[in-house]
Image (cartoon, grey):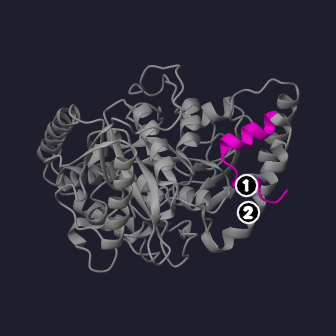
Amino acid sequence: MGNLNWLTAEDIAAGFRAGRFTPPEVLEDCLAQAARWEPRLNALTLTDAAGAREQAQAAEVRLRAGQPLSPLDGVPVLIKDILLTKGQPCLRGSWTVDAKGPWADDAPAVARLRDAGAVLMARTTTPEIGWKGVTDSPRAGITRNPWDTTKTPGGSSGGASAAVAAGYAPLALGTDGGGSVRIPAGFTGIYGLKPSFGRVPAWPLSPFGTVAHVGPMTRTARDSALLLDVIARPDARDWHSLPHDPASHVPDAPSLRGLRIAYSPTLGLATVDPEVAALVAAAVGRMADAGAIITQIDPGFDDPIEIFRTLWWAGAKAALAHVTDRSVLDANLAALLDQADAITLDAYMAATRARGALGAQMRGFMQGYDLLVTPSLPIPAFDAGLLMPPGSDPAKNWMGWTPFTYPFNLTQQPSASVPCGFTTAGLPAGVQLVGRMFDDRGVLAASHAVEAALALPQRRPA
């Protein structure tokens, strides 16, 4: 039919109910769009067209019988190539993974989607083991931003963000261990949510441990809420998973009235590109116009980059402890492992204690506010294939240009990137909403209300 791939999941489900189109028709438009863009974007590692068609046909039968498995029955979804999917190789962007498998298991979120009747269409690119904030890997190559293919889509869920922004499918599963959902959402102008840690179960647990979350990447907050309703169910394989809450995450009519918002333009530690700063400030102004109570204040913590670096570097080392020849790895990842070799147990435990203090500080700070608002990123997207934009401090690695994201992996709070406009060069910018721990519904409701307050015109990559 030509444009069904651009519909939201919510509108696709409504179209199914009304009989305006069928799951196979939606899928074919999604597959056609992916085929059209993939030579330029390189956002997918595998497209299971045959399997997806079988799933779509089965969904059509259920829908015609009036027996859908869920609101997402028949809706195409993309899976990041970090999450296990039965029958499909999970390569993680690395030559250290044997493609032969066996691939006998679904990750918990993938299993929930399969149970819900969603159509598992394709797998999306990631940097090697998801270690950095851009998306290129020795195995999959460079993934590009659909708004400007010379630029990165961010990472590590960059394939998912590029694919959703380019209209491959309305839904994608990403992972976020230091911003890996929010960074690419900000760079590509889509919506990305890092739920509270444990809200979406993970198995196997990420090698980066309890900083790593699984979350939805979509074009609207309500679509992310629909996806979260399906995947936010506990799994016995993940002992961190939170108890099931049967109430829906899908927000009602948008409202910001009376919401107490702490607005921190820099977190007290970042330098922000003037265009990005202006777009975020304008978005905060619209929030105030919509009735939010805005207080400009920093949360008052020092840059936790050393805490994060110690935990993240140690996680990467653990993930690749079996690798004897580091020359097969991403060169920057191999250099990171050389640094990780020097991390002592005392240093790791000190970082863990400091992390706990940061988490306690943020829980105390958030008692006075419903949300903390910051830019999602301090800069627009930079050239693809680079680890850092020119002029960055190499000692800070990719964390030097992601100061707004990784702190809230340490604190485990729910946080989202909401599109807030475009620079004069046509590159997206995002505003980050950070909620109280466990208040995923509050973040989604506020995100929906911010989308309504900004009322951005619909744009698609040219």
Circle 1 sits on which residue? Answer: 5
From the image, give the main secondary structure of the stretch colored magenta: helix
Membership of 364 in magenta stretch: no
Q: Closest to the observer: 183 or 300?
A: 300
Image coords of residue 230 (percent x, y): 59, 31
Magenta-drawn segment: 1-17
* 254 horizontally vs 36: left or right: left
Q: Earlier in the sequence, mark 2 or mark 1?
A: 1
- Identified by mark 2, the residue type is Gln
The quadrant holding residue 283 is bottom left
- Residue at the spot 49% in from the left edge and 42% down from the top edge: 448
Q: Position of residue 434 (x, y in %)?
A: 33, 43
Image-based side of 243 in relation to 270, left or right: right
Three-letter code for the amino acid on which mark 1 is drawn: Asn
Q: Kindly identify which residue carries mark 2.
A: 33
Rendered image: mark on residue 450: none
- What SS does tag 2 mark? helix
Contact flag, marks 2 and 1 (Cβ < 8 Å): yes
| Foreground disc of the pair 2, 1 | 1
Quadrant hosting residue 248: top right
Element type at mark 1: helix
Q: Residue at x 53, y 58 (%)?
A: 456
Residue located at (22% from left, 63% from top) = 270
